[in-house]
Amino acid sequence: MSSTRIQKYHVLGAMLALREFTVDDLHRLTGVKSQTIYSVLARNQSYSEVIGEEESSARGGRRQRYRMVAEKVEELQMLLRDAFQFLAVSDEIDVDPQIALSALASAEDTLDRMWFLAENDADRHKVIALAWTELESARIPTIARGLTSDQRREIEDRSIALTQRARELAQQLGSGLIPKQSEEITPSSGMMAHMRSKVRSLYESIFGSGEHDRRKTGRPWQPAQPAFSYGAVPQPVLFLYNSVPKVTDETTALIKNIEKHSSAIVRIDPNDPRSWDVSPDDETYPKFCVMLINSKQKSKMDQHLEFMKCHVGEWAIIVLDEARNPAVRNAILGQSGSAHYIDEAGKLDDPAMRNLLNPAVAPAMSVRGNTSVASSPMEGPEVPLRVSSSPAKTAAAVRRTRNDPRRV
Amino acid sequence: MLSALEPFADLSDSNQKAPIEYLRAEAMQRSLLSPRMNDDAQPLDAFLRDFVANVREAMQINPQVDDTASIDAPLAALQREAERIRCNDCSYLARYNGAVCDGGPFDADIVNAGGECQSLVRDSFQVALAVTRAYYGAYSPTDLGPTRASYLVRHKDDLELGSSSIFVTAHVEPGDPKCVTLTVNLEKFTWTSLRAVSYLLMHECLIHLHERERAAVATRPDANDPFGEGWMDWIALTVLEEATRGEGPAARYSDALLMLSSEPQAARDAHAHRLDASRSRDDAFRIKLRRGAEAAEHMLRLLKTLPSGAESAWETLLRVSFDLNREDIETLDRHAWIDKLYLELSPAAQLSRPALNLRLIPALLEYRKSRNIRELLAAVIYA
């Protein structure tokens, strides 16, 4: 993402935060040059309106005061959430390892001393939430600068151990990872929109930013990596739902192929929230989740989103919409819909997805202990899909490579 | 009285090292905060007269002393101060039984009843209290009534604070009045410690005298609280620096602070020491305190980027800080306030800042109008 586009989104974000503003206000908040701000305002006229003029501190000057158009607020919120999620997965970020190590030390203190001192379950819920926030600030971008491999390994190893500890404590409490997340989600709560954008961004991190990386680095296309990672071993874990969706013959082939990329399979009962909070074992820490959603069973949607809310911070999730229901697809993936679908002729518009669906071109897997590590980029000839008969069986799979040159 | 000795502490780089070292050694061995409980203790006035005489003698006989001019002036000041002090006038018991501080059993009673030897500590406490009242009055006035407070000095010869050269600490005991207690290691009490006293007292008064004032039941301050000991400590340090510079609502106490050896660098050193995670024990909680202080700085930086309102960014931060400090907020929620803001506002989290700003900035703008600290707290920690 170019710096100009970043500036554009920062300006739009400032507009949304302030609601009423002048160009000077936006400049002070974002650091973007006034001339650029004028350009952004001009090119995005639908989001704001002039509500008056006032004296400027500049000699003899007057400046216009703007206001966000109320009807456009939600639209801009959605746009920005997508944009900043995408920004987070596609730009290299300087990292000070001491900040991450300090955050881990804080999390350790929280999970040990503060957990011990907590007097009741309500306090213990808060302790878990605190630890989770601290672990969040210990996260390091996958394409970070400024880290040695030893530092990265130390941070990741400690993060894994602490995350596991937090999960165990949360399970002791009989709740989800973060207590607040067990609250009911409704479409109007705002969380639903947040989830949509999360899924959308994760989708783009896998399928969308590959092109971006190629343009940027000149390297061959590789699946993009999620923005953040805890673990050093990037194997996917397949989550299969007991009731959603109905697994057909067509999807069986897909699932089998995904299984080949997976180090573990975890069966989840959507009707039992306790089964959602899973981690196979210490060594096969889950990186990706493949989630199948049958759009005909929309009533289950909230449960799936609840699950995603607990895990999207760590695991990529691809939504498979068996029914090709555009309304549901857009509800999940966002407005612009860059999702890849299989057309009536059984062709897929994305070669990478075609390859993923075809076991013949699956990447070589090396086995280390009970973990599997993909060792080569996913490339190869286009192969006809096995799924063909019924309309629109969408598929996706996920992988990461440990030897990705972008990783330090 | 102690301040009269201070010039001698600043001459260590001069060529008058021998008498300076002598002065220091004397000062260290003979505690000036209070006469010691030992056999050779003598009343302070007699001690000081002897002290000045000994210094003059040392200067005369020491061949290294070739320029006495730099010492003469402060020594003369010390002599004037020494002559002013009369233990017989100071001791409230002198008129009854002739007792003065001489290592005897009444020393503690005498000095805590207004001993001249503790005037610097007492004055520092009164100024810290006045500065605190000025700031809370300006930014967080309430109907709670004045906070009553007293102070006490305790001696603890085994007091050690890690690798610090500061051998004085302070805490607040709940009650009415609340009692600010300074604990001092007299054996190791040096100028460095003395210069930190104003900062320590400011910390106690500005933070802990008003901490959770709205709570139904008084609680003892939590030494591990990153809001009280990190965020608010940075606020206290900055308030002290501002007042010493003669700025802000307590500008009129600038001269008093300067006279009381309120040394900005000493205060900064003491603040840094409080947050120093390299100390041998309790690393993790020191890290949390430092995150608290950094979160306050990040918040100030964010506030400075907002459209100007009726008050400055610093004033808004003071208002937020004082309001939060007074509220009856659970310790874990104070932790959450720090963690959430640190996570979202630190430079390391720049990419996620816009996401937070979309909810934090409107909440801050609303707080500037409504002054509802509970709503602001909820916007941060429950988001």
Image (cartoon, coloured by chain):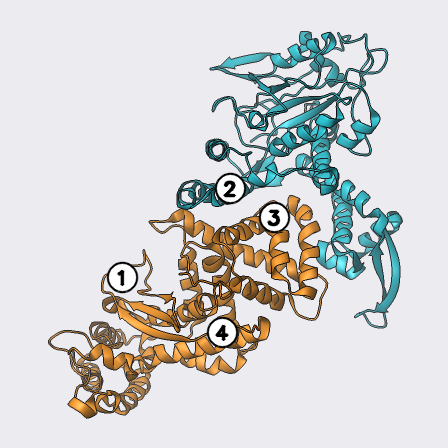
Q: With respect to residue B130, does B350 lie above or below?
A: above
Can you tell which mark lies on residue A125?
2
Q: Counting other residues with Cα less than 10 Å from the Cα at mark 4, is it few (<14), some (14-19), or many (20 or more)?
A: many
State which quarter of the image contains the N terminus of chain A.
Answer: top right
Whether residue A213 is visible, yes or no, is: no
Read off the residue under disc 4.
Answer: B132
Q: Colour of chain B?
A: orange
N-terminal label among 4 and 1: 4
What is the CA distance from the residue labelled 4 to the residue labelled 1? Answer: 28 Å
Q: Position of residue B1 (x, y in %)?
A: 31, 83
Q: Secondary structure at mark 2?
A: helix
Residue A297, quarter of picture: top right
Q: Colour of chain A?
A: cyan
Subunit ID for the residue under disc 2 = A
Up/down of A78 relative to A275, above or below? below
Mark 1 sits on what residue? B159
Q: Which residue is nearer to you in this view: A65 or B180?
A: B180
First along the sequence among labels 3 and 4 = 4
* Quadrant of the rendering where the C terminus of chain A is positioned: top right
Instruction: Please name whichever residue, B89 or B10, is drawn nearer the observer in this view of the structure.
Output: B89
Report the residue at 30% width, 72% height from top.
Answer: B153
Tell me which amino acid carries mark 2. His
Camera-nearest label, 4 or 2 = 2
